[in-house]
Amino acid sequence: MFAFANFALVIKLLTMNSDLEVRQHNALTNARYEYTETQSNIFLVLLSKLRKDAPDAVYQITVPEMEELTGNQYNYKQLRESTKEMMSRVHEINTVHNGREVFRQLILFKRIDYILGTGIIELEFNEYATQYLFDLKNNFTSFQVQAALSLTSKHAKRIYIICSQWKDKGETKKTAIIELKRTLGLADSKGREEYTEISMFRRNVLDVAVKQINEKTDLLIGYKLEKVGRGFKNIVFTIKPQAVALPLTFGVLPDEAPGLAAHQVDNARRLLSQLSIVTPALVDQILASPARVAACNKFAHDVKTGKHAKTRSLSGLLLTVLGFKKPANGPLFDAGPTQ
């Protein structure tokens, strides 16, 4: 079963212009709660600002940055209604307190203030929530915040994060479908349940999530359903890494890219392998350059979105982009990135 011990997100801003990598305590990853898409985006943007040495700080988000990071348009009233509900939203987690296993019901925020006439929202965390949000050590899930923000299905966002917890294992642990529904806010302890027919659950939740995650994130997932008796009772998600489906940086040219995180280099390495670019000296030269790694990630996005669908040799094209080959018929692209 998915451990209900992954609830808190700690997002580290890697650089001012690069992708955000999220670290979320495993209690929050598997907590039972339900956010709308807007509420999930507010939470993700907020968590991108957290600093491990400032658990008592007051954090701010603004309407313009919400729009910039999500690609959506928001108005003050819409966000105000969303955060009003978040103030009363209970997160249910399994945790340990005073050496005993407990089922904890937790509200994250102490207060949320709207500074009138500024578009600024100030938020302060409940003191009991900070242990799940700051100073995470070993028990956390890491995922790409821009990938999570790009998903329009609220269930896809949760399933992406759950799968990110198990990406190094290749598949999640087997869990009861009803438990997954409780994690997604689709079933409660009183026996009320949405999508009671498995075909409805697959069509409206699972298949939508799989499609969005595979098209927009660094994971390629599927799922296996297990029958017990005459009905499906359990589920396992299968997980493979794939070259990032999002540009490393929105609006940043490859040769402007700063230092990169390990997972971004790994994504570039996987792309090179997929394109059979495996000469050790060449691979080392590409991966040693932050600019070329950024260009690889952008190239992966372009391939994923069909930009190079008619290209005969993707490997040749990539080497041209990286500056290792000259175009056959004049410059197809801007000058390749430099070291």
Image (cartoon, rainbow, N blue to C red):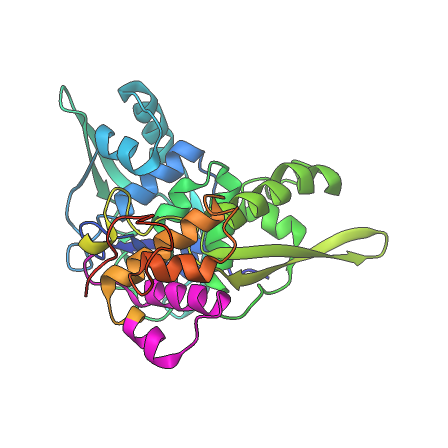
| 328 displayed left or right of 308 | left
Residue 241 x/y as whole percent: 49, 62
Magenta-colored stretch includes residue 282: yes
Q: How many marks?
A: 0
| Residue name at image x 50 percent, y 66 percent | 274
Q: Magenta region, mostly helix, strand or loop?
A: helix
Occupied quadrant, residue 151: top left
Residue 111's spot in the image, x, y percent?
23, 36
In the picture shown, does residue 244 fall above or below 271? above
Q: Residue shown at 23%/46% (left/top)?
A: 252
Work out whether residue 337 or residue 189 is closer to the camera in this orientation and state it: 337
Say if the magenta span includes residue 83.
no
Side (left or right) of 123 relative to 268: left
Task: Name the spot of residue 51 as percent of width and height, x first.
Answer: 19, 55
The residues colored magenta run 257-285
As rendered, which of 54 and 47 lies closer to the eye? Answer: 47
Question: In the picture shown, does residue 10 fall above or below 107?
Answer: below
Residue at the (61%, 52%) spot, across then down: 179
Q: Is residue 102 visible?
A: no
- Quarter of the image that includes the N terminus: bottom right
Q: Is residue 116 above or below residue 307?
A: above
Q: Quadrant of the C terminus?
A: bottom left
